[in-house]
Image (cartoon, grey):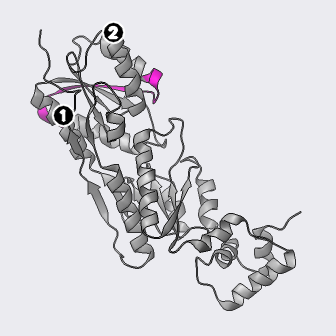
């Protein structure tokens, strides 16, 4: 049986992560320790895998982006964050490794961070009480966050300003004359991936609707096209029927729009639609194109990478809390309501 890194660590009397550092060169270790590791590798005829050997080729190092996979999959808008983080890491001289183990697999995450293969990490899709945060903190691995838990003391994070998100959406529709709005939300719960942003968006919409005197009907749909079709049925059954829809569920919105069109209702003639946190590409793929209130995902991801790299390179020592303002882009899906 071929020797493993753990075998090398036991023979050399060091940790498994120290063996990884000796292979990759990502951390400074003493000459004596390196010699013990190299002697153990030679004695066991241990050959590092190609990935570990390749880490030494990174000019700055390697950082991990933990984007947990869940039952709702990944939308095109969400992938924009991953692409932007990858691009900025490359610009800063780092490789980016995507980790996608489930959000509740904290044991698996603990194993990953203990391997010593990365210099730092970015956590995405944080929940209100995210169990990943203490795991990474205990490992003393430098990290920052895209999103935030409820307790942000001492944490580095970049997130959307959800209060402004809700306010812009409701103000836009109220300004057009809408006073009855259907909120197409998501049926996610703690600690499921996505529950943090959903909770903040829900609270922001409710508060803004209350302030503007707008009646808000909330429907929590499954994150799927059939879930959107079911939501359209619930929308049609309301009496009186809302004149506008705010959607924070990109996948379900596709099914909703299809079903509404099939029943003979027009957008925006019979119902206006405003989509939250949807990228420009996805917004332009519908007919009519969707009015959106969205944070600039590329800017958020790039800022998170910059914060982490600055932390790794000793350029920044504070714990920045950055809320990025969303932008309202009015397209063809919102208009004043048609009154009987």
Q: Residue drawn 53% across and 40% down?
A: 70
Residue bearing the label numbered 2: 263
Q: Which mark is residue 201?
A: none
Query: SS for tag 1?
Result: helix
Q: Is residue 21 left or right of residue 282?
A: right
Quarter holding residue 138? bottom right
Q: Is residue 216 magenta?
A: yes
Q: CA distance from mark 1 to mark 2?
A: 26 Å
Tell me if residue 160 is in the magenta stretch.
no
Closest to the camera, between mark 1 and mark 2, is 2
Residue 131 x/y as whole percent? 51, 54
Question: Vertical placement of 222 versus 167: above or below?
Answer: above
Q: Residue at position x 41%, y 18% from top?
A: 229
Residue 130, above or below 138: above
Residue 152 visible from this viewpoint? no
Res 170 label = 1
Name the residue at the bottom extreme: 32
| Magenta range | 208-227
**Sequence order check: which comes first, mark 1 or mark 2?**
1
Instruction: Say which of 117 and 267 sits in front.
Output: 267
Rendered-image quadrant of the C terminus: top left
Mark yes or no: residue 291 visible.
Answer: yes
Q: Is residue 286 left or right of residue 60?
A: left
């Amino acid at each position: 049986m071929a020797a493993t890194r753990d075998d090398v660590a036991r023979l050399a009397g060091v940790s498994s992560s120290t063996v990884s550092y000796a292979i990759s060169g990502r951390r400074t270790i003493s000459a004596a320790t390196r010699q013990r590791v190299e002697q153990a590798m030679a004695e066991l005829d241990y050959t590092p895998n190609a990935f570990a050997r390749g880490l030494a080729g990174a000019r700055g190092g390697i950082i991990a982006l933990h984007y947990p996979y869940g039952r709702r999959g990944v939308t095109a808008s969400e992938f924009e964050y991953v692409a932007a983080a990858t691009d900025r890491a490359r610009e800063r001289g780092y490789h980016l490794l995507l980790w996608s183990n489930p959000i509740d697999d904290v044991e698996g995450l603990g194993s990953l961070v203990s391997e010593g293969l990365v210099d730092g990490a970015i956590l995405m899709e944080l929940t209100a009480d995210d169990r990943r945060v203490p795991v990474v903190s205990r490992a003393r691995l430098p990290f920052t966050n895209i999103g935030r838990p409820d307790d942000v003391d001492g944490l580095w994070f970049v997130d959307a300003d959800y209060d402004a998100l809700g306010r812009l959406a409701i103000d836009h529709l109220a300004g057009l004359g809408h006073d009855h709005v259907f909120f197409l939300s998501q049926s996610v719960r703690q600690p499921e991936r996505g529950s943090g942003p959903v909770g903040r968006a829900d609270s922001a919409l409710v508060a803004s609707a209350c302030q503007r005197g707008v009646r808000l009907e909330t429907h929590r749909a499954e994150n799927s096209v059939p879930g959107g079709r079911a939501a359209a049925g619930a929308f049609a059954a309301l009496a009186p029927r809302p004149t506008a829809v705010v959607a924070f569920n990109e996948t379900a919105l596709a099914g909703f729009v299809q079903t509404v069109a099939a029943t003979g209702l027009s957008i925006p003639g019979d119902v206006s639609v405003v989509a939250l946190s949807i990228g420009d590409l996805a917004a332009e793929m519908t007919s009519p194109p969707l009015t959106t209130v969205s944070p600039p995902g590329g800017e958020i991801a790039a800022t998170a990478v910059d914060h982490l790299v600055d932390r790794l390179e000793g350029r920044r020592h504070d714990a920045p809390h950055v809320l990025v303002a969303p932008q309202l882009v009015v397209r063809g899906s919102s208009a004043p309501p048609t009154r009987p």
